[in-house]
Image (cartoon, grey):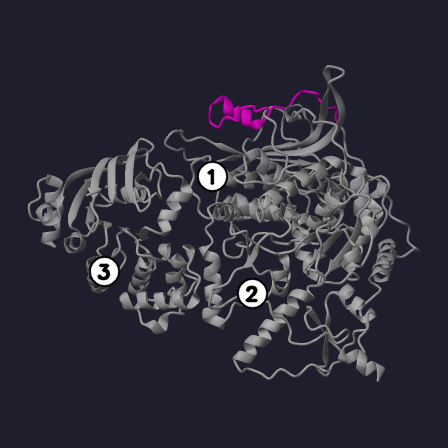
């Protein structure tokens, strides 16, 4: 005898309790602290902040702990929290030319003012598992040098002095805000960049990679990649001037791309741009490549039908919170839809004489 | 008599390059106008401007609408122009793939224009589609097959059926025989001639093939470098070309 | 969750959503873009409906949530608990008691009244989406009322299968103007959409809200000679004997045994309480 399924509420409560138990894991092993996550899994924390669009390492680390290390779940927690925060106002644009660089490299010049600063990079490590890390080792320290305090000029400015690269004039118009207005197309570059800055790292990487393999090729070099702290300033109306409200770490990438020139423009280099919270090199380089590929129309290039040239495709599919939600919603009960399909298939099979449906048990 | 289409001083530029310029002519009901010239002469640009597929930079294109009489289609709002595009106008593309829905059956392809203007009886739509497949010599048994399974000539004939099913008053054709084998071309031309005569179609046909205009067009415009260099009755232009370029065009065909 | 505003969303956001709702009501069937917020539940799990409900609920409301017709499916429970916590509104499972009903995939069997609001969760608001993937193009098609393609799809169904092969999310035309996706309700529910209650549709991930004011004309697309057929499984409910309610098929054993019961649990329970019996209840009693 069929009994209508009741007790959904208790099932959910029990599932949540089990989840909490699994999250904690073996109680004989010390619990992971948020501080530990924040200070030792920094790249993951950065990703959660970048794609969560909220610069708060403590909350990002908490979200990672709560999500059992599922970064997209952690990003989701951050986004859901962020959306409830009141807005006090907008900061001034950050000045990346005044960045205190931890890392600053250029692929287009061997040496240049400000120098090549490798910083804490995986780049030249041999990817060999370091079994020493399996044991708790003594803290290591790196040699230090006093910061020069000099401003590090942007590489693109060197090219600009010769007129070899497109102008990127300062534009102080308020950019649209994806989190406050619906995404509408065609999307201007500022909006595209905003969407890319919070887009899924894997998606952005895949799109960027596809341009390198010929699907909308843009011949990109990393003109400059810089990582470091910048001051965040805000105008306080009551004071009448801007005060520094904090410092954030960002990764900025500017690519230098080939450009054949058009009827109205002589050949010159063009730019792709990426800016991401924290140390997020892969994401910022990917972002620059995709940004550049999306600019085909403005630069009078051909649309070769590549996915990375298609703003509607990129912008509608890059957000991992939208994507994962919709993907996973097919786990939800769909038996009403399925039932109507079932009836239809049965009807069509009956008409085709394909089978004799067994009568329902009654 | 009011011209069906009255073109006045139409021009289109691509940056500093001339697409076409200083084009004016009248097309009367039941008339077929041929536009010939080599590739790059501006004939396809002109056709696309007239049909509203490309925005013209200058000029007027008056079409004698059923309800309001002559209206400048270049100044029409997009909804009105698109409505014309699926009712009184038809456009036959050089490549059938551009004018067909390749994932939709032959019957659906022919029926789409009918449904777009409100036909809601499946049986009637299907009968109509069947009738039109017959008129373009496609076997009725192929009505539920997709155009991907058709030969190039059949696809082109299907495209023509799809366009003519709503009884358009003006048909634009862009190299309708362009991509086809010579033997297939002959059959298609024969078919087109029959349809033009039976239906009293008004049409503008762009082609580089003088045989096509000789067979179909009442009047001819010869284009070179975006300009109309000569126009007149087809036989007159072809048999007694005045402009040096036309003479070259005609003689080059004759020599072949 | 006292840290959050009434019904979770801040007042500014609610105002923005209410504007979209009013615009939707003014242009029935038109998809109004709105700045959907990230909700504490995943996109695709009812965030659009939840935002519309949040902007609609007042402290005096009585709220009901159904998923697949039932009040006790997990997602319905989850959403109901969310509003119990954040809005502290009364909740009910009784259709007639509720002032706001959020639903996924069903319209209640019991006719709704003028003082009720039905909020639908919508996954893909664009009825033309699977014919034309581009949003820029589909918006143009709506603007210019170019819906020929929609009928081409129905034509193809009939030519291939002998009848229209769309069983749920069956497209409708609203007041002779906009073609609208009714959300994935079974086509059986389509005729109910001409109702006394206000119907609001929220698509969170796709950032669209649309609406039907009371008594709006809603016509399911069809052909004169292949009329729309809102049929369902040809059985009565095994529990309450209802002949005209939408049924879930339940597999009862591994021998191919199955039974059919009302998908609308509240409707079924009420009928049974009123003494109606189905074949299964009779057998059990015997």
User: In this rendering, does residue B225 appear at all?
Assistant: no
User: In this rendering, does residue A78 appear at all?
Assistant: yes
Q: Which mark is residue B195?
A: 3
Front position among marks 2 and 1: 2
Q: Which mark is residue C166?
A: 2
Q: Residue most toward the top?
A: A240
Q: Which mark is residue A296?
A: 1
Q: Residue at x 38, y 57 (%)?
A: B113
Front position among marks 1 and 3: 3
Q: Quadrant of residue A315?
A: top right
Q: Chain of mark 3?
A: B
Q: Chain of mark 1?
A: A
Are the residues under badges 2 and 1 in a single subunit?
no
Q: Quadrant of residue A275?
A: top right
Q: Residue most toward the left?
A: B240
Residue B240 x/y as whole percent: 6, 45
- Residue A277 vs residue B130, the one in the foreground: B130
Q: Chain of mark 2?
A: C
Is the residue marked by circle 3 packed among few (<14), some (14-19), or many (20+) residues within 10 Å?
Answer: some
Cα separation, mark 2 vs mark 1, equals 40 Å
Q: Residue at x 47, y 60 (%)?
A: C151
Q: Would you say B43 lies left or right of A79 here?
A: left
**Element type at marker 1?**
loop
The magenta span reads: A145-172
């Amino acid at each position: 005898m069929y009994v209508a399924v009741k007790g959904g509420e208790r099932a959910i409560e029990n599932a949540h309790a089990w989840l909490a138990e699994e999250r904690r894991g073996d109680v004989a092993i010390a619990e992971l602290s948020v501080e530990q996550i924040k200070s030792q899994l920094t790249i993951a924390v950065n990703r959660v902040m970048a794609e969560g669009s909220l610069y708060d390492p403590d909350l990002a680390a908490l979200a990672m702990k709560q999500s059992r290390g599922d970064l997209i779940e952690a990003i989701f927690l951050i986004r859901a929290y962020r959306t409830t925060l009141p807005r006090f106002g907008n900061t001034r644009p950050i000045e990346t030319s005044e960045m205190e660089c931890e890392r600053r490299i250029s692929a287009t010049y061997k040496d240049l003012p400000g120098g090549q600063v490798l910083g804490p990079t995986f780049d030249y490590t041999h990817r060999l598992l370091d079994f020493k890390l399996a044991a708790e080792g003594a803290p290591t320290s790196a040699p230090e040098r006093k910061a020069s305090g000099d401003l590090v000029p942007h590489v693109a400015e060197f090219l600009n002095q010769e007129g070899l690269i497109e102008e990127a004039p300062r534009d102080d118009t308020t950019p649209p805000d994806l989190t406050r207005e619906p995404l509408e197309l065609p999307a201007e570059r500022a909006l595209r960049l905003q969407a890319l800055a919070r887009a899924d790292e894997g998606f952005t990487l895949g799109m960027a990679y596809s341009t390198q393999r010929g699907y909308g090729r843009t011949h990109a070099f990393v003109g400059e990649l810089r990582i470091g702290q910048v001051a965040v300033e805000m105008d306080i109306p009551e004071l009448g001037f801007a005060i520094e409200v904090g410092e954030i770490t960002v990764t900025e990438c500017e690519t230098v791309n080939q450009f054949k020139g058009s009827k109205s423009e002589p050949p010159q280099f063009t730019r792709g741009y990426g800016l991401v919270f924290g140390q997020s090199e892969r994401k910022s380089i990917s972002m620059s490549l995709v940004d550049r590929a999306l600019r085909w129309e403005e630069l009078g290039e051909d649309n070769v039908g590549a996915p990375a040239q298609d703003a509607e495709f990129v912008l509608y599919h890059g957000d991992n919170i939208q994507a994962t939600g919709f993907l996973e919603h097919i786990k939800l009960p769909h038996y009403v839809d399925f039932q109507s399909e079932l009836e239809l298939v049965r009807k069509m099979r009956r008409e085709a004489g394909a089978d004799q449906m067994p009568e329902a048990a009654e | 008599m009011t011209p069906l289409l009255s073109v006045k001083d139409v021009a289109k530029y691509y940056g500093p390059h001339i697409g076409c310029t200083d084009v004016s002519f009248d097309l009367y009901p039941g008339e077929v106008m041929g536009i010939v010239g080599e590739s790059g002469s501006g004939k396809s640009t002109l056709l696309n401007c007239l049909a509203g597929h490309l925005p013209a930079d200058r000029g007027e294109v008056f079409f004698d609408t059923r309800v309001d009489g002559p209206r400048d289609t270049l100044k029409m709002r997009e909804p009105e122009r698109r409505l014309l595009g699926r009712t009184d106008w038809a456009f036959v593309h050089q490549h059938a793939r551009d004018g067909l829905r390749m994932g939709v059956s032959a019957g659906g392809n022919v029926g789409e224009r009918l449904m777009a203007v409100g036909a809601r009886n499946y049986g009637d739509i299907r009968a109509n589609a069947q009738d039109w497949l017959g008129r373009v010599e496609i076997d009725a048994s192929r009505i539920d097959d997709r155009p991907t399974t058709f030969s190039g000539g059949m696809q082109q004939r299907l495209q023509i059926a799809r366009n003519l099913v709503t009884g358009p008053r003006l048909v634009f054709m862009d190299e309708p025989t362009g991509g086809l084998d010579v033997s297939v071309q002959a059959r298609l031309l024969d078919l087109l001639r029959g349809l033009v005569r039976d239906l009293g179609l008004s049409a503008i046909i762009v082609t580089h093939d003088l045989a096509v205009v000789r067979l179909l067009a009442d009047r001819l415009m010869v284009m070179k470098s975006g300009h109309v260099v000569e126009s007149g009755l087809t036989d007159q232009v072809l048999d007694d070309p005045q402009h040096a370029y036309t003479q070259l065009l005609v003689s080059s065909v004759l020599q072949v | 969750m006292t840290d959050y505003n009434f019904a979770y969303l801040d007042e500014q956001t609610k105002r923005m959503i209410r504007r979209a709702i009013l615009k939707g009501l003014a242009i029935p069937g038109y998809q109004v873009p709105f700045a959907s917020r990230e909700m504490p539940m995943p996109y695709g799990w009812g965030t659009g409906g939840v935002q519309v409900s949040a902007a609609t609920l007042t402290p005096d409301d009585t709220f009901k949530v159904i998923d697949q017709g039932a009040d006790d499916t997990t997602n319905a429970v989850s959403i109901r608990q969310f509003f119990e916590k954040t809005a502290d509104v009364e909740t009910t499972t009784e259709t007639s008691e509720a002032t706001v009903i959020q639903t996924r995939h069903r319209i209640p069997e019991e006719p709704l009244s003028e003082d009720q609001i039905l909020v639908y969760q919508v996954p893909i608001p664009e009825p033309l989406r699977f014919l034309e993937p581009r949003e820029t193009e589909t918006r143009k098609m709506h603007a210019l009322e170019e819906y020929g393609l929609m009928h081409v799809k129905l034509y193809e169904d009939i030519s291939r299968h002998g009848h229209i092969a769309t069983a749920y999310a069956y497209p409708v035309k609203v007041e002779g103007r906009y073609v609208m996706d009714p959300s994935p309700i079974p086509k059986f529910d389509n005729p109910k959409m001409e109702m006394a209650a206000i119907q609001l549709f929220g698509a969170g991930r796709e950032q669209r809200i649309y609406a039907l004011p009371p008594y709006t004309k809603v016509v399911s697309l069809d052909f004169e000679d292949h009329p729309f057929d809102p049929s369902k499984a040809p059985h009565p409910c095994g529990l309450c004997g209802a002949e005209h309610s939408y049924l879930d098929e339940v597999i009862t054993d591994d021998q191919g045994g199955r039974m059919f019961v009302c998908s609308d649990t509240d409707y079924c329970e009420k009928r049974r309480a009123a003494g109606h019996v189905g074949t299964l209840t009779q057998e059990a009693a015997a």
